[in-house]
Image (cartoon, coloured by chain):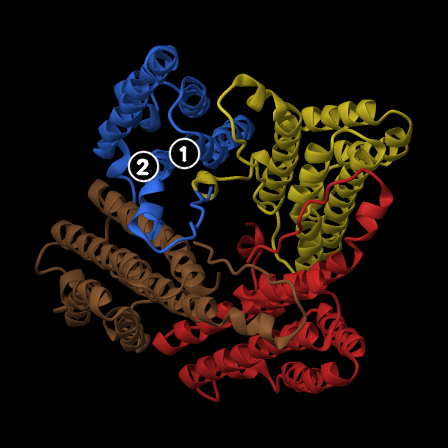
Chain colours: A yellow, B red, C blue, D brown
Amino acid sequence: MVLELKVPHGQDLATLKELGPIFLCYILSFANVGIYWNNHHHMFHSVKHVGGWVLWANLHLLFWLSLMPFVTGFLGENGVSTLTVAVYAVDLLMCAVSYTLLVIALLAQHGKDSAFARALGSDLKGKLSLASYVISIPLAFWQPLLSLVFIAGVAAAWIVPDRRFAADSRSDDHAR
Amino acid sequence: MVLELKVPHGQDLATLKELGPIFLCYILSFANVGIYWNNHHHMFHSVKHVGGWVLWANLHLLFWLSLMPFVTGFLGENGVSTLTVAVYAVDLLMCAVSYTLLVIALLAQHGKDSAFARALGSDLKGKLSLASYVISIPLAFWQPLLSLVFIAGVAAAWIVPDRRFAADSRSDDHAR
Amino acid sequence: MVLELKVPHGQDLATLKELGPIFLCYILSFANVGIYWNNHHHMFHSVKHVGGWVLWANLHLLFWLSLMPFVTGFLGENGVSTLTVAVYAVDLLMCAVSYTLLVIALLAQHGKDSAFARALGSDLKGKLSLASYVISIPLAFWQPLLSLVFIAGVAAAWIVPDRRFAADSRSDDHAR
Amino acid sequence: MVLELKVPHGQDLATLKELGPIFLCYILSFANVGIYWNNHHHMFHSVKHVGGWVLWANLHLLFWLSLMPFVTGFLGENGVSTLTVAVYAVDLLMCAVSYTLLVIALLAQHGKDSAFARALGSDLKGKLSLASYVISIPLAFWQPLLSLVFIAGVAAAWIVPDRRFAADSRSDDHAR
């Protein structure tokens, strides 16, 4: 899950300015991958046991996250257009869908009355993100830049940490 | 073990369509690496101790898995042909062979009456996969595309999780 | 966080000599990333619990560390100039700032009288590093090479391990 | 520590044959990195505590291991010559030197009568490897290919697992 920035050749400021758009994409993608990483980490701390389907749901989420460097590069190197923003939004949507499926698989294993289900709560933010990504795709066909700003807004909303699972996490997990 | 997709330049749909074949290869390889990852994870949870040969058997498996990005790129960038599919099938065969050797090394350490041996069972799916990859190589010389579809079928059969070891796994292992 | 060295083509010593500057940058960046890695590892061993803000502070640090391969390549491939050294110094400054923010977030959670706060002490070396990077940026506009030597000096000062947290670390954490 | 193989373009056997030399280098480097990985893993299982110098000795080893993809590519893409083999041998020598320094740092912490010191024994194989790499460098100036074969022989000697630490390792460490 390594995002990559190509090294430009040149020693003047203009060289660096050209990197502006791809750098902004890099920040946005880094934030999104980081949000999943943190929430994923938090969520699995409330988890008591993992069965086979959870592993596959997890792998499914990893698949869409693994495409982030590709869609980031596609957007950053080709610039903001309907196609590049739509592809970016589709990948984020699929990340959100696969995360939701992972939550469902975990809920199925733990039961509706489990500590995990109580810790999860209504998952309003997750549902709103899912809806936002669905909206951002047609929006990219009308106003690609607005769609991208909208996507960045969703990421910003997630920067406020998800308190539901935070209490369960212990220090040693984050030391690496 | 990072699979890579090169970023294309262009803003029309045709640019993306050209990526179709390599994207399908990417999915197939991601699934295969994921299958090994999951099963490997499951298996080592039933393992009580690891001796020197197990480490080397493990490294041997890692070697063939580490070639997956190469054989995926070779297939995806050059298209379906006898050579590209055969190379892909040979790597998958060697992954299956080295996984089998790892199982044998673990069995030798634990003994035939151990909990590990009982958890492993007859390993029918492993043996069938091995046989399938052996068949897919000559098949690539006759019908490369059919061979590839056959290989994809083996991966699909593995998506159903291996229940033998699933009961032993605990939540914290999958949290990272 | 992988630093990369491009493989040159040629079989004479001159080919290798051309790599000299980028190799020195590689060493400097490897040392800097290693310093953060070691200190980060040490610090989290004194940590009792992690809340949401610590995770984001951690991600923030990771963001600036993830830019190290880029700023290293920019400096190494374009040579020592005001722009390349200033960009390198800015990234190191931001790493130091985000590390300081991480320490502040951890202090806020543990309290001023906690074992963590006592273990941290006055963090004089951290504050001096921060000040050094602030100085190195304008220095790059006057004497880029001197600025780089100054930056290397800060790294050298860190090679002496930070004894504050060392006593808390246990062997198994460093085995991977 | 990812070794890389570039994907060739072409669908005939000749394309693959050209990859022969670099593939052999890849195998040799994979084996060497794997040997360090396994022995390192084994050794740290006998370790009771880690102080600051051990961390830096560890980082030093990591530095030379991180150059393996570079020296492998340099050898594989430019072919067997005095320069390419000598560079490869120097990196392996520095890996062996830094591993020895790591052992010395660990011995200094544990004392000559510790369980660690007893488990380590005389480390004859480590000393012989060190001597072999010293010999392989001048050998590369006389007979580069012979030097490379000699280096491969050292790796082969290590494939027999180091029994000293094997008994201490437990299953869960190797599960990832």
Label 2 environment density (alpha carbons within 10 Å; few <14, some 14–19, many ≥20) = few
- Where residue A135 appears, as percent x and y from the top left, is 87, 32
Question: Is residue A132 left or right of C77 when viewed as pictured?
Answer: right
Q: In what element is the residue under mark 2? A: helix
User: In terms of image quadrants, where is residue A21?
Assistant: top right
- Where residue A119 appears, as percent x and y from the top left, is 67, 39
Kindly identify the amino acid type of the residue bearing the numbered disc 1: Gly
Residue at (55, 81) in percent of width and height: B97
Residue at (41, 60) in percent of width and height: D78
Is C101 in front, or is C112?
A: C101
Question: Is residue C82 left or right of D123 when viewed as pictured?
Answer: right
Above or below, A146 against C135 in this view is below
Question: Is residue B127 left or right of C33 when viewed as pictured?
Answer: right
Is D70 in front, or is A42?
A: D70
User: In terms of image quadrants, where is residue D139?
Assistant: bottom left
Residue at (77, 50) in percent of width and height: A101
Q: Is residue A53 visible?
A: no
Which residue is disc 1 drawn over? C76
Above or below, B29 against B96 in this view is above
Q: Earlier in the sequence, mark 1 or mark 2?
A: 2
User: In terms of image quadrants, where is residue A37?
Assistant: top right
Is D152 in front, or is A48?
A: D152
Q: Is residue A101 visible?
A: yes
- Where residue B168 appears, as percent x and y from the top left, is 56, 67
Above or below, B135 against D68 in this view is below
- Mark linked to residue C24: 2
The reply to whether dot 1 and dot 2 touch (C-beta < 8 Å) is yes
